[in-house]
Image (cartoon, rainbow, N blue to C red):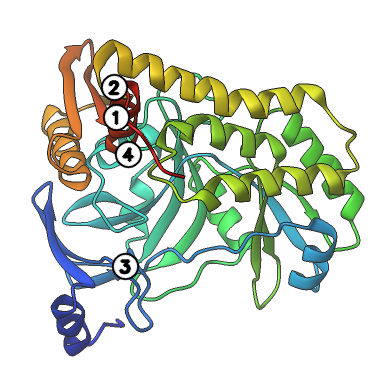
């Protein structure tokens, strides 16, 4: 069993790069930032290492990007608009850790609804990597158009405990299928020469409002890259524009660049409707923020989640309040509805709230 040397952990703790946590009565250590060879989000729980999930580079130009990144066949897997979790069997149960290394009370509570957790009891040396998506999640405002309520889980990788790396795509697919785990859709196999076929796939995904694809090589060195649609860029702007003051300008300019590069590469003619939707994403989103401020004196995003256990809902709310800062996460209600404990809360956007309060009172700004 591989380990991280004690002195490395102590140095990370002393430098503030790691922190001891206790959530849902599970004590563990979380790496808050990259530290030497250890990526952010790495977790040590019960002496075992759940390695941090690596970042995947993005291709902005498909034709040249495929030739540059892939020397042979690769598969296109649908990129799901959700949040990343790593699921492991520890402390006598299945636990879900977010990309940042927090034990997620919501996902952990709902795991038995989302997947067959007996897979991890039978395969305790594995880590399941998955995306959780849907309108009733506690982290993201956006969600895939094909999920109308609650949330769903999509497995996209299997990792070993204690070391980085993934099962090869074919081996992973066989294991996931045998265990009947819900999987991220694999949309086909391609080579860099199959550019037109891949473009056709992406045009279909764009028309359906889907996010894009993750491309995964089918042979060593197992390279990966992601590519997103124009529709995803517009959707990102729409759900994020009220956080205009908190996000760096590059968040929005990068998405506009992605959108235009997608249109250019696909040879798509000028589309007044797309241009209208992009403009509306900015204008309507900000007008809604102004209307919200006038009505309630702050700008917020509202979230609704279903839990099996009330204590897990309370733990999720406490974690959100801790991460956002004092007074920025407000409980709206936590009530029993049939088989569910339903939690509703709102996250205040302090930057937009402050800006609108200032300018609507007649304050001046400098630009």
Whether the residues at callouts 2 and 4 have beta carbons within 8 Å, the answer is: no
Where is 308 relative to 90, above or below?
above
Q: Where is residue 306 in the image (x, y as percent from the top left)?
A: 28, 24
Residue identified by numbered label 4: 111
| Earlier residue among tags 1 and 3 | 3
Measure the alpha-carbon separation of dots 2 and 1.
Answer: 5 Å
Label pair 2/3, CB-CB below 8 angstroms: no
Which image quarter: residue 65? bottom right
Nearest to the observer: residue 24 or residue 264: 264
Q: Is residue 103 above or below residue 231?
A: below
Looking at the rendered structure, the secondary structure element under dot 3 is loop
Q: Position of residue 349 (x, y in %)?
A: 30, 34
How crowded is the residue under tag 3: few (<14 C-alpha within 10 Å), some, or many (20+)?
Answer: many
Q: Where is mark 3, residue-wise?
A: 42
Q: In the drawing, what numbered circle is on residue 358?
A: 1
Of the numbered discs 1 and 4, the one sitting upstream in the chain is 4
Picture quadrant of residue 268: top right
> How far apart in space, not on screen, are marks 2 and 3 (Cα)?
46 Å
Q: Do the residues labelled 1 and 4 touch (CB within 8 Å)?
A: no
Give the structural element (helix, strand or loop) at label 1: helix
Q: Nearer the viewer, mark 2 or mark 4?
A: 2
Asked if labels 1 and 2 touch by Cβ distance under 8 angstroms, the answer is yes
Mark 2 lies on a secondary structure that is loop
* Residue holding disc 2: 361
């Amino acid at each position: 069993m591989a380990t991280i040397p004690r002195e490395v952990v102590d140095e990370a703790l002393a430098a503030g790069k790691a922190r001891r946590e206790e959530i849902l009565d599970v004590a563990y250590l979380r790496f808050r930032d990259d530290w030497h060879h250890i990526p952010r989000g790495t977790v040590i729980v019960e002496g075992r290492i759940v390695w941090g999930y690596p970042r995947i580079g993005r291709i902005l130009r498909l034709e040249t990007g495929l030739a540059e990144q892939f020397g042979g066949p690769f598969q296109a897997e649908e990129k799901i608009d959700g949040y990343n979790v790593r699921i492991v069997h520890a402390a006598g149960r299945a636990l879900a850790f977010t990309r940042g290394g927090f034990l997620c009370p919501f996902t952990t509570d709902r795991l038995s609804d989302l997947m067959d957790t007996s897979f991890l009891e039978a395969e305790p040396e594995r880590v399941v990597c998955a995306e959780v998506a849907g309108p009733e999640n506690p982290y993201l405002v956006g969600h895939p158009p094909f999920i109308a309520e609650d949330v769903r889980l999509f497995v996209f990788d299997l990792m070993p405990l204690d070391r980085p790396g993934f099962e090869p795509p074919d081996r992973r697919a066989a294991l996931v299928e045998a265990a009947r785990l819900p999987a991220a859709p694999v949309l086909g196999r391609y080579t860099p020469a199959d550019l037109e076929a891949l473009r056709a796939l992406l045009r279909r995904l764009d028309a359906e409002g889907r996010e894009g694809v993750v491309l995964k090589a089918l042979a060593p060195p197992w390279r990966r890259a992601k590519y997103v649609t124009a529709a995803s860029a517009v959707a990102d702007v729409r759900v994020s524009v009220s956080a205009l003051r908190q996000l760096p300008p590059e968040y929005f300019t990068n998405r506009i660049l992605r959108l235009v590069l997608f249109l250019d590469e696909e040879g798509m003619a000028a589309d007044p409707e797309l241009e209208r939707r992009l403009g509306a994403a900015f204008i309507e989103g900000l007008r809604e923020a102004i209307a919200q401020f006038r009505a309630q004196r702050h700008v917020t995003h509202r979230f609704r989640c279903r839990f099996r256990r009330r204590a897990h809902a309370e733990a999720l709310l406490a974690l959100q309040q801790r991460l956002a800062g004092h007074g920025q996460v407000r409980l709206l209600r936590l009530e029993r509805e049939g088989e569910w404990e339903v939690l509703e809360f709102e996250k205040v956007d302090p930057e937009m709230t402050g800006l609108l309060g200032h300018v609507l009172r007649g304050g001046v700004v400098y630009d």
